[in-house]
Each structure stands twice: as C-alpha cells, then as structure tokens.
Image (cartoon, helix red, strand yellow):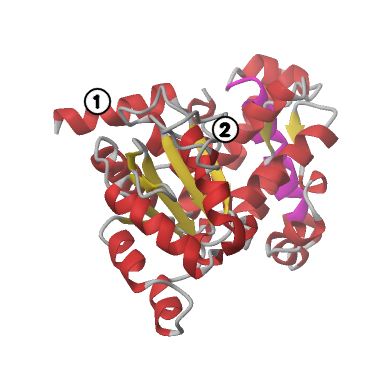
Amino acid sequence: MAENDRLRQQLRDRHRLADLAGNSGAIRRVRDLIAQVATSVHSVCLQGEAGAGKRRAARALHAASTRSNGPFVVVNCASLLDADADAQLFGLDADPAGGPGQAGGCAGRAVGGTLYFDDVVRLGPLAQNRVLRLARERVWERSDGARLAVDLRIVVATTRDLEPEVSSGRFDPELREHLASLTIGMPPLRERKVDLPMLTDLFVEQFAREHVRGVRGVSTRAMDMIMNYDWPGNVAELRRTIERAVVMTSGPVIHHHHLPSEIQTSGDSAAVSTLGLSEALEAYEKELLQDALRQTRGVRSQAARLLMTSERVFSYRLRKHGIDTRRFR
C-alpha cells in the first residue's frame, strides 16, 4: 500500500495531467492501476474511445515508472507499413544512429524508456509479429541472425476491442493474448461527468496561463451546459472547447455564449426557455451573484462592488436566493 501511495504521489508530482484528474470511481481506478503496474516491465494496453486520454495515460505510466528519465517514443501505427516495418522499428543493421550491434529506428530511440504504439490495430501482420517479439522477449534479431537485447517497455493504445479483430483475422491472437493480461480501460467522459467541474477549472487555469488571459472561471449557466453535454470527443474535446473559450473571453469569466453552439443547445437553454419571465430573471440574477462571488473567492464586499451595488443590497439578495458565500472561498 505504501508503495502504491508513493507511486501515486510521483504520478501527481512528476507528470501532472489534467485528463487523469477527478474524483469519479472510474478515473480513480485508472490512476490506481497505473500506480500498480508502473514498476513492471510487462506491456500495457490502453483501450478507450478517441479523445479519452490514452496517450496522456501512457505518459503518466511512463512518468510513474523507474524508466521516467528515459525517452517516451510515439509510433503512429497507421504509418508503420509492413514493407518497411523492420527499418522503421529497428533501422538498418549498420544504422549510424544506432551503431554496429545496436538497434536503430523507433526501438533504438526508446531504449531505456517507453515505446508507445498509437492505434495498434492499424498494424499489418508483419509489424504485429515484430511488436509481439519485442514486447514478449525484448530482443531484436538482425538479418545476420544476431539477437540483441532491447531494454524498453511496450505500451499500446486501441480504440477498438481486440477480440473481434482477432476473430476477423486482422489481429494476431498471440499479441492480443499478451496484451490482454494488462489492459487498462479509459472511461469516456460521459461516464465520469462528476469530474467535469474539476477538469474545466484545470483547463481554464492551464490555458489562461498559456495564452496570458485573465480568465479565472466559468459562469454557472456555462457550467450547466458543460454538464448537460455528452462530450462525444471526450476529454480532448473538452480541452479544445475550454482553450477556445479562454482565447475568446475578454473578461475574467467564461459565459455560455463563449461555448460552441452544440454545447449551448445541449439541454440547459431548452430548460430555460420553459420558464416564465419572472423565473428567468430570478435565475439570471442568481447566476450574476454566483459569478461575482466566484471571481472574488467569496469576498462579499468585493463582489458587491463588481456588480455596482451596496454590500447591504448584495447580502439581501444572497439570502433571497439561499447562496452561501463559504462555498466560493
């Protein structure tokens, strides 16, 4: 247990990844599995929808491992053709980059670290065979018959279940069997919506810093829309959405109109349209009060000045809407 706690702390401190943040059971299981297998040399398969954070999970796994000081090399499997698989993976037998008796190519660059195969189902039969031997035996066999040790760890990612690929004859059953023993499923964002507020805040902070913007948060209405949307593009789509909103926002808060139209129509606006005028105005007033408190971290006097009203009137309206300032501190 102490070792797992240490690895989880390493994961947080050495490679902070917003995609893996959250308190949902689904993402906690992913973090726990990464901590448990980090020190192993066995290959790992990350399975999940596009945009679910597989590559970032692979980087987190690398960062939490004893190989964290080594390289993290990405192989795009769609461009790794059978015709030149050996050359791309290992280079030529006398590759100057690797030197005589050493692997070149992707494997050579990844020695001492992690070799990550993105979208492994795109590999052809010969490339799959080479990956299997490299993953299982960690050796490279030269054309002259010499077998050379290659010290690296294999991590692969797939958006598809490998079993149907095996049944159809498109995927090597031995490679699938090897990978199945250590598979980590990456949950889609729609199954961990409880994590959306934390992920949103982390992305706002990240992109406000990167783009030198004074954005500090998201309005209540905008957050409602974010929560109502199903995020088919998963964390990657949320990341892009928040970055775009940060760039478009001139003030300290991202509002609903800064979000893409498909998110604005994801349910919140439909609900609002059913309200009468007085109810809609009450909802808007409550949103303004909460936004002001969020910007001032719950300081009542500053929030009142922000809305150009007195602290007495501001406090009255807080009581009217049942808003507790302590939750914004």
Task: Indicate whether 315 appears above or below 32.
Answer: above
Which of pointers 2 and 1 lies earlier in the amino acid sequence? 1
Query: Which residue is under mark 1?
Result: 6
The mark total stands at: 2
* Residue 279: quadrant of the picture: bottom right
Within 10 Å of disc 1 (Cα), the crowding (few <14, some 14-19, many 20+) is: few
User: In this orientation, which residue lies closer to the viewer: 150 or 54?
Assistant: 150
State the CA–CA distance, disc 2 to disc 1.
Answer: 23 Å
Write the start and end of the magenta stretch as one range: 280-297
Quadrant the N terminus occupies: top left
The residue that appears at 69% across and 21% down in the rendered structure is 209
Label the magenta part by its dominant secondary structure.
helix
- Name the mark on residue 202: 2
The answer to whether residue 141 is visible is: yes
Residue 25: tell me if it is visible. Answer: no
Please state which of the two labelled residues, at mark 2 or mark 1, is closer to the viewer.
1
Pick the residue in front: 240 or 249. Answer: 240
Question: In screen coordinates, is 195 left or right of 270?
Answer: left
Residue at 57% x, 32% y: name it.
202
Task: Report the amino acid beneath label 1.
Answer: Arg
Farthest residue, direction left = 1
Q: Is residue 290 above or below residue 76?
A: above
User: x, y percentage for residue 148?
Assistant: 34, 40
Q: Residue at x 60, y 17 (%)?
A: 299
Residue 297, picture quadrant? top right
